[in-house]
Every structure is written in structure tokens, then in C-alpha cells.
Image: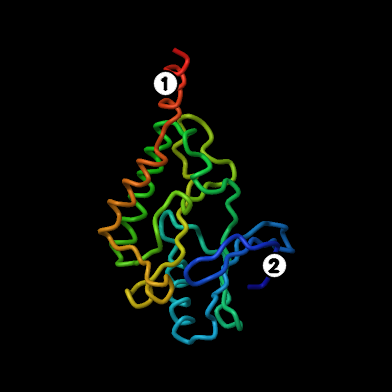
Amino acid sequence: MSYPIQILRQLGAGGNGDIYIGQRLDTREFVVVKYLREHHLPHTRKAFEREVRILQRKLRGIVPLISADLVSEQPYYVMPYLTGGPLTQHGGRLFDVQLHNVAFELAQTFATLHATNIYHGDIKPDNILVSGDGPAGRRSLRKWCWLYFSFLAESWRDAWILGSGSAQRSSDIQRGRCLFVRSYAVSAADRTKAARRTKI
């Protein structure tokens, strides 16, 4: 990484790393930095390096990689900070066409990952991140949501190392999809109908 980043605060922690929000000192742009937690273990460092290589492929629907440093004492990589927050914050305010857009993007992303035998972290609305301007417009079909996984791996062994034994396989997709639909796929139209029934 050829530019300095000032770490501001911790955002969270995953199976293999700690996640911080930072700010580039050259552009003042906010970014997310993920540090490998168990950086003293050679096998963990190797798995982390392979995770970065997956991100470098720029796979459809995955939060893009900006840069990485794999040779420092504590390896890390940098991603853009999506100020729209997780999809959870937008639940109940999306129109049907936007929900269909989310479902389509998720299906395409999972199809890409599974076609290349990539293991990934858990599937939940908190891991679907929204860009800064969010889902603007009732008929918005542009891309405004991205998936972030706590880890990505090409083998079950790496998935176990990086995800503390919580890797998702293809058979888990149906359960994850049902959870998403049941908990969050409430459109603005449905909410309006419910409000009208309440008034009666």
C-alpha cells in the first residue's frame, strides 16, 4: 500500500480478522481495513493470502479489494467503506423491483462462487452492504448492494482456518434464502397495504 491510512475505530470482528474503519490521508476517503488476527500462525497467514487472491479476481457482487499488504507483521487488506450500511437498515422500505434486484444479484453472486468451488462465510442481510446513495428511485435497477463475507476460501481446510469452522456450502443456500425472504423481504407496497388495514 503506497498511501497512509489513519485508523479511526473498530467496526467489528470476523472469524479470522478484526475490521476497522479508516481514512486515507491523501484523499480523505473512508475505507475499511481488515487485519488478520492470528498473524503469528504460518498456516493462517497462508490461508489469508489465498483469500486476498480470491478478492483480486474482482468477482461479481463481492465488495471490491482496494489494496493489501501480506508481508507486514500483521497482514491486512483494504476495501471501500459503503456508507449506506447493511441491507437490514433498509428493511420494509424497498419496492418490489428493488427486492427482485437484490435477489437477482445474490443469485448471480452465489452462482459465481459455487461454480468456482469457493467457500464463503455466513449469509445474512447484515452482510449485504448498500452503497452511499442507496437504492434511490422506485425503478432503480442499477447496482447498489454488495456482499461481504467474513472469509473466502478455495478449500475446506482454508475455510475451517479462516472461518472457525463455519463455512457455507451449496446446501445451505436454501436455508439462507428462506431466512432472507421471511425476515426482510417486506416491500413498501406491502407496508402501505398494512397501514391501510390498520386505519380501517
The amino acid on which the numbered mark 2 sits, given as a three-letter code, is: Ile
Give percent across and percent down for residue 15: 47, 69
Tell me if 76 is positioned left or right of 167 in this view: right
Lower position in the chain sequence, tag 1 or tag 2: 2
Mark 1: amino acid: Lys
Front residue of 164 and 85: 164
Drawn side of residue 177 relative to residue 8, left or right: left
Residue at (45% x, 18% y) in the render: 198
Query: Which numbered dot is residue 2?
Result: none
Residue 173, picture quadrant: bottom left
Relative image position of residue 65 (x, y in whole percent): 52, 64
Residue 5 disc label? 2
Q: Would residue 20 be found to the left or right of residue 50 on screen? A: right
User: Which of labels 1 and 2 is toward the front?
Assistant: 1
The quarter of the picture where residue 186 lies is top left
Residue 38 vs 31, above or below: the answer is below
Instruction: Look at mark 1 in the image and give the residue it sits on.
Output: 193
What is the spatial separation of the Cα atoms under label 1 and label 2, in whole angstroms? 48 Å
What residue is at 42 percent from the left and 23 percent from the top?
194
For the image shown, how many numbered marks are present on the structure? 2
Q: Looking at the image, which is closer to me, 77 or 85?
A: 85
Which type of secondary structure does the marked residue at label 2 adopt? strand
Q: Quadrant of the N terminus?
A: bottom right
